[in-house]
Image (cartoon, grey):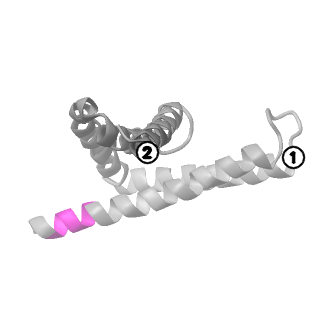
Amino acid sequence: MPAKDHVKRVTMSLVGGSILLIGVALLVLPGPGLLLVLAGLVILAAEFPALERHVDPVRDRAMKAAEDSVSSPLRIAGSVLAGLGLIVAGVLWGLRVFPWLPFPGWSAGSSLILSGVVLFALLGWSYRKVRARRDQVS
């Protein structure tokens, strides 16, 4: 294996593994955990074909979760409120309004704000995808 290929394989393994681990953490933290798990698996499967068998089940679950998130006006409203809550919490954390909060400051606050923005982006993507699918069926 040439050195260039070896460096690419190691780099892709580190990137894919990192995204996968962040996704696993975000399964219990606020953020798009399942989609990051999927992204990490796709990257790793390009270098390790044995992982390909795990991509489709995770993709199916991620797409199902995306569809479920916009399946009713109540769910959409809940997702919007959660996104706004994340952004407000991020600002409060960043401004250190409550100094007793764990890890006060912009490092934690910005990650909460980013999670809220990502939630809104994914919500919009999910809504367009589900609406396009409904238009095709009609």
Amino acid on which the number 1 mark rests in the picture: Arg
Secondary structure beneath label 2:
helix
* Magenta highlight on residue 132: yes
The percent coordinates of residue 122 (x first, y second) are 43, 57
Quadrant position of the N terminus in the picture: top left
> Callout 1: helix, strand or loop?
loop
Q: Could you tell me residue 105's position as x and y percent?
A: 83, 45
In the image, is residue 73 above or below residue 62? below
Q: What residue would you read off at disc 1?
A: 96
Q: Is residue 138 left or right of residue 22?
A: left
Q: Farthest residue toward the front?
A: 2
| Residue 8: mark | 2
Marks 1 and 2: in contact by CB < 8 Å?
no
Q: Residue at x 63, y 49 (%)?
A: 86
Asked whether, in this view, residue 80 is left or right of residue 8, the answer is: right
Viewport quadrant of the C terminus: bottom left
Who comes first in sequence, dot 2 or dot 1?
A: 2
> In whole angstroms, how far apart are the C-alphas of marks 2 and 1?
42 Å
- Asked whether, in this view, residue 112 is left or right of residue 68, the answer is right
Residue type pointed to by label 2: Lys
Along the line of sight, the residue nearer the viewer: 44 or 33: 44
Q: Observer-nearest residue: 123 or 22?
A: 22
Q: Main secondary structure of the magenta part?
A: helix
Query: What count of labels does the image hold?
Result: 2
- Which class describes the residues within 10 Å of circle 1: few (<14), some (14-19), or many (20+)? some
Look at 76% across and 54% down and name the residue there: 91
Q: Residue at x 80, y 36 (%)?
A: 103
Span colored in magenta: 130-135
Q: Is residue 14 left or right of residue 75?
A: right
